Each structure stands twice: as structure tokens, then as C-alpha cells.
Amino acid sequence: MKSKIEEASPDSVHLLLGVLEMEVKARAPGKIILAGEHAVVHGSTAVAAAIDLYTYVTLRIPLQSDENNDRLTLQLKDLSLEFTWSVARLKEGIAYDSSNVSPSTPASCSSQTLKSIAVLVEEQNIPEAKIQLSSGISTFLWLYTSILGFIPATVIITTELPYGSGLGSSAAFCVALTAALIASSSSDKTRGDGWSSLDETNLELLNKWAFEGEKIIHGKPSGIDNTVSAYGNMIKFCSGEITRLKSNMPLRMLITNTKVGRNTKALVSGVSERAVRHPEAMNSVFNAVDSISKEVAAIIQTKDEMSVTEKEERVKELMEMNQGLLESMGVSHSSTDTVIQTTHKHKLTSKLTGAGGGGCVLTLLPTLVSRTVVEKVVKELESSGFQCFTASIGGKGAEICF
Ligand SMILES: Nc1ncnc2c1ncn2[C@@H]1O[C@H](COP(=O)(O)OP(=O)(O)O)[C@@H](O)[C@H]1O
Ligand SMILES: C[C@@](O)(CCOP(=O)(O)O)CC(=O)O
Ligand SMILES: [Mg+2]
């Protein structure tokens, strides 16, 4: 005899399965910072844009309680890793005052709660080579339990972004996860065709929660990464204030991943320590970066007063100046120098993007640069062991799909 599911049409199978579990998907993009990284943490202006590389989250919540599967499971598909906790263990292990935590009021994870979460993460015996994931998994537990409470579910993550390379994988992870969590608790679960954006209220809420998540990963984030991942497009950002930019020039960037691993939290705190040692000098550096970012934003938006070539020349010079200032903050790396020198031989300009210390480097590809030159540069960079790619800039922000 056929089971009910076998008898049903594909649509009703979905409905039938839908009775057993609810599924929501979310995705959020990575980003490039065109100007102003690090200085933005200290109140300077920065310019960033979303790129078309995403982190995807699938959240499955069982709708019927099942004593045998009372667990919260996190699967990092690309890394073939799975972490799982019983809901009872989470309730017992996470030390927070639930009266202070509400899904609609984003709050910081206290150091006491973070310590208790770290114990739950340690119990998972993360392989030593992947220990950098600990902060991401702690963030997962904090965001999940703060927004959905202690309910069983399976959360599956995949990403097109390299981890810890300056393309904002941490922010895309926080934004996509929060988008899925918020969408799952929203009353409007209209099954639509493919991806759709969240409404303004939910976008604002998710951006605030994602910022709290970034705090666990970055220590002292500026908020630019989660903001551009949530809202998409290209933005000018200063102390939490966002200006959407409408680009009036073609901006093509080659992204080179040096594959030199680094950690944003350590680099950000290194800059802060330098600022404590040399407050006046570093303030001048941050002010110079502020002016550079404002000029970059102005040039990008300029309409007819300047030719494209002139705009490109100016942006190129500003990128060079910004790179010099990043070097003076102590966040560049010999691998970045190799990219800069290689591209310079072909009259192209590069700067690090994100936290630096290795990671990714941006090279402006002016409109008049020939394909042959680009191919030659890419070949040379790849022969140094780097990985090159282009990405479309200024696209969509967080989206959900039921
Ligand atoms: N898909 C993901 N799943 C789990 N953790 C993630 C994921 N993406 C990023 N993270 C966390 O973010 C960290 C990398 O963030 P960060 O050092 O800020 O670099 P970036 O944001 O430039 O990639 C990882 O080590 C991990 O802890
Ligand atoms: C260095 C910084 O300006 C950007 C860090 O970006 P990423 O995590 O390296 O992708 C830090 C921040 O703004 O939070
Ligand atoms: Mg990051």
C-alpha cells in the first residue's frame, strides 16, 4: 500500500511535509571596502559595497515535538562539520537572565553569557585547524537562543565567501542567520517565488542583531559590514550613519585572495593599541582616511562634470593614498605588497580590503584596460599562489525565501 506521501501530488507533499517542519531560507552578501577600513572603527567615513557572493542559511524547525530529536544542530556544509546540542544542555549551560533578552530588543552578549556559551562550544571539540570557527559558533548560539529561545531546529549554512579574507564572511553569516531567525518568527510567511527582501522594520531589527553578532567575532566592529550586507548597494558609512550611494561610474574591481589567513579581531585591536600609543599621529591618519573616503564617495556619485577616465584616475590615486595609510596603521602584509607590485607593473593600482594582514586585495580595472592586460596580471598573480576573481558590485542585501 502506498503511503500518504507517495500518493500525494508534489504540491501536497510539500504541504504534508510542511505540517511536520517549517523551513525558511535566507541569504546575505559579502562586501568590499573601497576606502576607510579600520579608520571607520575610530569614527572616520568609509565606503563599502555588497558583492554577489553570498552566505546561505536554511533553518528547519520541527512543528511537532519529538522526544528523540530535541536538539539544536548546526551544519557547516562546505566544511563538512556538524555541531549539536540537546535543548536541555543549552538551557542548563547558557547563563543569561531571560528577562533581559527579547527578540525585538537587540542586546549585547554579556561577558558572563559569552563565557558560558564558550563552554558549550568547547564541548564540541572543534578540530584545532578550524578553531577560528569558535567565535562564529558562539555567535550562532547567542543569536539563535536570543531570537528563538530554546527550541529544537536544524540550521544549515553554506557560503560562497572565503572565511577570514576581508570579504565580510562574518557579517554575511550574522545577517543571513538573523534574517532566517526573524523570518521564521514572522506571521507573514507568504510562499513566494524565490528570494524576497525583508520590510524596513525587520531589516533594521536584523541589522541591529547582526551587529551584536559581529561584536562577538570582531570585538569592536564599526557596523559597516553588517549594514552593507543587510541593505546591499553601495554605502557611505560614518559612526552608524548610512548614506546610500548611487554610482555614476563603472567600477570594476579585480579581487585577489592572497590566501594568507588572519583574524579581524586581532587586527582591529592592534590598530586600537597603536592609537593608544600614538594618539595624535593616529588621529591624523584617521582624519586623512576620512577625507579620502568622502572624496571617493563624491567622485563615484559625480555626474557629468568629469570624464570616466578622470574619475578613474582620481579613485586610483585615492586608493593608493588609503593603502599608504593602512600601512601606517600596521595592517598591510608582504603578500599585499606582492599584489601591489605585480599590478603596478601593468599601471594598475591596488589596496587591501577589509581587515588586511593578508586576506583580499582590490585592483581597480579602469574601463580602458584591455582584456589581454587583465589576463596577464591574473596569470602572474595566480602563479604567486593567489586566487583572482571579479564580482559584481553594489547588488542586493539580505533576502529570504519560504
Ligand atoms: N559560514 C560561517 N559559519 C560559521 N562561522 C563563520 C562563517 N563565516 C564566518 N564565520 C566566522 O567569522 C570568522 C571570520 O570573520 P573575520 O575574521 O571577521 O573575517 P571576514 O569577515 O573578513 O571573513 C570565522 O573565523 C568564523 O568564526
Ligand atoms: C577592519 C574593519 O574595518 C573591516 C573588517 O572587515 P573583515 O571582517 O576583514 O571583512 C572592521 C570593522 O569595520 O568592523
Ligand atoms: Mg569580518
Image (spheres, grey):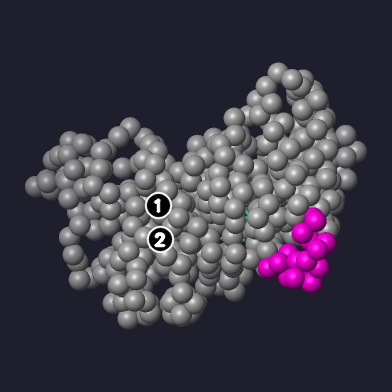
Tell me which label, 1 or 2, sits earlier in the chain.
Answer: 2
Task: Name the residue located 61 percent from the left edge and 70 percent from the top edge.
Answer: 129
Residue type indicated by callout 2: Pro
**Label of residue 205 in the image:** 1
Q: Is residue 215 found left or right of 84 in the rendered image? A: right
Can you give x and y, in whole percent of width and height, for residue 232 in the image?
52, 40
Ligand 2 under 8 Å from disc 1 Cβ: no
* Distance between mark 1 and mark 2 Cα atoms: 7 Å
Q: Secondary structure at mark 1?
A: helix
Left or right: where does residue 263 sit relative to residue 106? Answer: right
| Horizontal side of residue 71 vs 230, given as left or right | left
Q: Position of residue 117 (x, y in %)?
A: 44, 75
The image shows residue 290 at horizontal and vertical percentages of 72, 48
Residue span colored magenta: 269-285
Label 2 element class: loop
Q: Are marks 1 and 2 in contact (CB under 8 Å)?
A: yes
Q: Position of residue 51 (x, y in %)?
A: 58, 40
Q: Is residue 361 visible?
A: no
Q: Which residue is mark 2?
A: 106
Closest to the observer, 18 or 24:
24
